[in-house]
Image (tube, grey):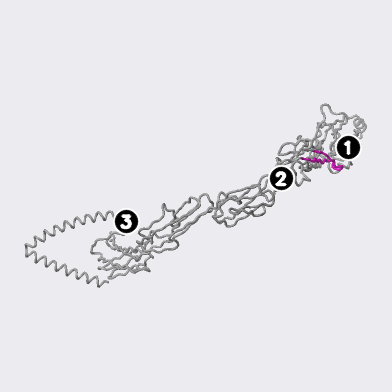
Amino acid sequence: MASKAAPSCRLVFCLLISAAVLRPGLGLYTVSSAYGDTIIMPCRLDVPQNLMFGKWKYEKPDGSPVFIAFRSSTKKSVQYDDVPEYKDRLSLSENYTLSISNARISDEKRFVCMLVTEDDVYEAPTIVKVFKQPSKPEIVSKAPFLETEKLTKLGDCISKDSYPDGNITWYRSGKVLQPLEGAVVINFIKDIDPVTQLYTMTSSLEYKTTKADIQMPFACSVTYYGPAGQKTVHSEQAVFDIYYPTEQVTIQVLPPKSAIKEGDNITLKCLGNGNPPPQEFLFYLPGQPEGIRSSNTYTLTDVRRNATGDYRCSLTDKKGMVASTVITVHYLDLSLNPSGEVTKQIGDTLPVSCTISASRNATVVWMKDNTRLKSSPSFSSLQYQDAGNYVCETALQEVEGLKKRESLTLIVEGKPQIKMTKKTDPSGLSKTIICHVEGFPKPAIQWTITGSGSVINQTEESPYINGRYYSKIIISPEENVTLTCTAENQLERTVNSLNVSAISIPEHDEADEISDENREKVNDQAKLIVGIVVGLLLAALVAGVVYWLYMKKSKTASKHVNKDLGNLEENKKLEENNHKTEA
């Protein structure tokens, strides 16, 4: 490369290149790189103003230099030497930083950056270290099983492609295994790939197992050095099958339940604590002295309450080794009387009973139309509101899924009952006539009018609730009229009439139908009124007797009274004739 320099300094350069010195203050500098990454080496020299060019070289093991890259300070051109191992891998920047792509183990060398002026040559060495993380260790050639009290090869732990090499450690349940004569034997070997120079490490473990190793995990790890220092990678854990003889038998009930109920399918499973486990057992059912030979399971389907009892199992070759369990089959019976659909008449009596029989105390809940009742229903005199769908439901709280329920659909029928009321509008221009009907099935209401008048908003009806509803019309009669309300269902046809006077003639309005919740209050008030009326009648009777005695003394008064009585009798006959005509 000296030929690339200016002719005037060719001789000086040759002299300096043969006597290049390390710049004072610059010691060895190390660059660490991961295998396959790009190695970046800064020049670590201050670029002088009279720089002619810069070069990079590396030193062979015998100390001889190999130049690999050149960059002129004037032409800014870069040239790479014909070194096969670095072909297409080098990059030299303007500040003379050298980059080597795809780092290899063979790149571990001493590289030197050289800056050349007319008067001097400056050098800055860099040591390159390349690291390769090994593959995750893996346990291979695993033993299919380990027998107690026998020294057996457990397996090989292998970790590949490491640089530098590492160490392998074995673990049992997280604790390091150390060699122990006759119980733990560890052999370690390492191989190097002649092409990649990467290490493969293998460690074999021979181990004498005991029953304490059952389900104990074994693992291995590789410890290696990287750019950031020492690191450790662990393998996946491996659990080995440990063979040992059976010493105890146990019995299980499957599926595991807190309680068993009638109709369940249950499976008895007999287990020996040896390994491999025994495959054949004798099962003894309640009341059966002879055992049933079977595999390690025996299934009972659709069990009944008489299946309650003691169940046992044993090994076929060791009948003295027995395991037992007690099975209780819970049951629940419910009887509702009456049940299904029942039709009764209003006022009837209907006794209802829900009888429970169970293996333990059961809870009972009554529902009516999806609403929980505070107590069981009792009907001494059926009302329309008693109709509905009743459900008696019982359950054993401790037994999942053990529930029973029976339903009663109660229908309360009744012939139509009618009550008619009227109201006069405050303006005095119209009157509202209401026909209150009670009955089930729902009676149909029909109105007829005798007389003349205009009908407004005819047959406006209320909702049908608890066997009651009403229909009303608004009229403005020009003369006295008679309104007839007819209610009819499948049981009977009922008719009632109400006389309504013309608008110009005032008359007494009748009260509306009272609601169910106020009926009891009204009944109490009615009792009080009846008491008052009886008192008034008694007073009137006394007054009548006194009046009769007085009238008896007066003949004239007596004739007048007879005349009045005759008029009253005549009016009574006329009223009866009117009612017959209306009917």
- Check disc 3 and give the amino acid type: Arg
Horizontal side of 44 relative to 499 (left or right) equals: right
Instruction: Please name the residue that numbered disc 3 is placed on.
Output: 519
Q: Which is closer to the viewer, label 1 or label 2?
A: 2
Q: Nearer the viewer, residue 83 or 200?
A: 200
> Residue 16 at x, y = what percent?
90, 30
Measured as percent of width and height from the top left, residue 388 is found at 42, 60
Q: Is residue 5 visible?
A: no
Tell me if residue 244 is in the magenta stretch. no
Q: Residue at x 31, y 59 (%)?
A: 513
Q: Amino acid at mark 1?
A: Phe
Q: Main secondary structure of the magenta part?
A: strand
Numbered label attached to residue 245:
2
* Disc on res. 533: none
Q: Earlier in the sequence, mark 3 or mark 1?
A: 1
* Mark 1 lies on residue: 67
The image shows residue 182, relative to residue 375, as above or below, that is above
The stretch in magenta equals: 186-207
**Alpha carbon separation for disc pair 2 and 3:** 85 Å
Nearest the eye: 502 or 345 = 345
Residue 435, given in percent of the width and then of the height, sits at: 32, 64
